[in-house]
Amino acid sequence: MKQSLQLKMGQALTLTPQLQQAIKLLQLSTIDLQQAIEETLESNPLLERETDHVETESGSHENVDFSSIGDSEDGATELPVDTRWEDLMPSSAPTPTLGGDGLDDLPFGERDANPESLQSQLLWQLNLTRFSDTDREIALAFIDSIDSNGRLTQTPMEILESLAIEDVELDEVMAVLHRLQHFEPTGVFATDLKECLLLQLRQMPVTTPYRELAGQLVSRYLEHIATAQPRQLARRLRTDETNLRHALTLIRNLDPTPGATIGSDTTEYIVPDVFVRRVNNQWRVELNADIAPKLRINSEYANLIGKGQSQSDQHFLKENLQEARWFMKSLQNRNETLLKVASKIVEHQRQFLEIGEEGMRPLVLADIAEQIDMHESTISRATTRKFMHTPRGVFELKYFFSSHVAATEGGECSSTAIKALIKKLVQDEDCRKPLSDNKLCSLLETQGAVVARRTVAKYREQLNIPPSNERKRHI
């Protein structure tokens, strides 16, 4: 093959360090951003927090005071910085991890972020219970085999087969299990829902009204409680409908997932990025001041540039000055983008703020991107893991985006609003004659939304609402 040189022309976009930093800051959550700011302040001596500043009240959301970037105090020339960017990098912001081995060593306010797991509580109870060495190993195997709801994921026979202990019979394994089933929370170590409910009933005082009847109902007719006629159940249990209703009330007060009452996941705290409040009948959007701290260049270090230091010292100062300016500009770009996006969302979703989910309008990323002249991927980063504090609660910015459904008058309805209507209709239905999906379609159409039956079924499933035959109640 003959080798040759060829000259070709083409276009390519290279990510500058400023652009990479701007994209990184934009995709960070508030908590991650605060950590990034602190790390930058610690690593860069030319960047400092402006502590002696006068707080001024903003007249509107367009007058938010961002980080100061002036260079009059350091005497250095302004370095070129990218002020606009298009997203070309995948979002890869790390999820913050909360740690700590001992809860006693943590400040009181941080202890809730390290909740006790179900297994650790059961192990604590095991250590307070007298077991032989063999029985303790069996108990540990049972504790390892429960899920987050406190339900066993292995049968006693499977536990026995997994033990590397000689001369252990199934009777001994069952004896250990029966002792463990008296641990708290009541109902743990059950193999299924029926056993879980029976364990809770058996541990109630024998004088508890309707305890025996509730036990018979769970043991014999648990799967028929939701659909069977009350008179028929009462006849089979040789009681009257009044006693049956009391027994059912007792059963409904039991916990089907007792292990879930003990948190096993780390609590994630949410810090709002923007606040929305109503002032003089107008909605005002403001940045959270904690995510936009005032930063400035350290004038003492900046004034040392060009004043006789060694070449390495001069290089160190100039490099850190440039990085400080890049960081401040990137932070300003992030805040400006976040504020623009949040303001447009509020402008579009005023009905939600005023009347709730039923007032949600259809909105997609492209709508906001077009209005503020940015790329859709930029809007995606600006709304991921960013939260808005409103009079109706705290919501992720992505919550306000939803697909559209046709309306009877030629307009469009938000899928979020349709789900809210479905939820409300089901809550108000007669439990003896629950609404079918077809009936829900008809009722939605009377309220201005044209929705296919399969769409209603999909939304109903997303809301964890069972079909009408499973919602039917005779009691």
Image (spheres, helix red, strand yellow):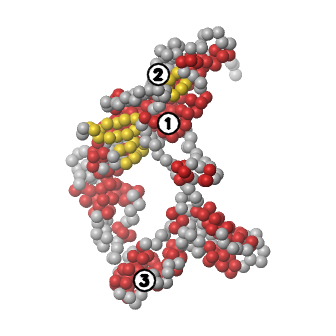
Above or below 408: residue 151 = below
Q: Is residue 348 visible?
A: no
Residue nearest the observer in this picture, 375 or 112 = 112
Name the residue located 66 percent from the left edge and 12 percent from the top edge.
309
* Residue 443 left/right relative to 111: left
**Mark positioned earlier in the residue sequence (3 or 1):** 1
Q: Residues within 10 Å of mark 1 (few under 14, many from 20)?
A: many
| Quadrant of the image containing the C terminus | bottom left
Name the residue located 64 percent from the left edge and 19 percent from the top edge.
316
For marks 2 and 3, give the CA distance.
73 Å
Q: Nearer the viewer, mark 2 or mark 1?
A: 2
**Mark positioned earlier in the residue sequence (2 or 3):** 2
Residue nearest the observer in this picture, 240 or 286 = 286
Secondary structure of the residue carrying numbered label 1: helix
Q: Which mark is residue 210?
A: 3
* Residue 375 left/right relative to 173: left
For marks 2 and 1, give the CA distance.
22 Å
Q: Nearer the viewer, mark 3 or mark 1?
A: 3
Q: Residue furthest right?
A: 166
For marks 3 and 1, give the CA distance.
57 Å
Secondary structure of the residue carrying numbered label 3: loop
Q: Which residue is mark 1?
A: 27
Above or below 462: residue 300 = above
Q: Amino acid at mark 2?
A: Ile
Q: Which residue is mark 2?
A: 69
Q: Residues within 10 Å of mark 3 (few under 14, many from 20)?
A: some
* Residue 155 left/right relative to 366: right
Q: Can you give x and y, in whole percent of width and height, for residue 351 in the image?
A: 27, 45
Name the residue located 65 percent from the left edge and 78 percent from the top edge.
174
* Residue 273 left/right relative to 14: left
Q: Amino acid at mark 3?
A: Tyr
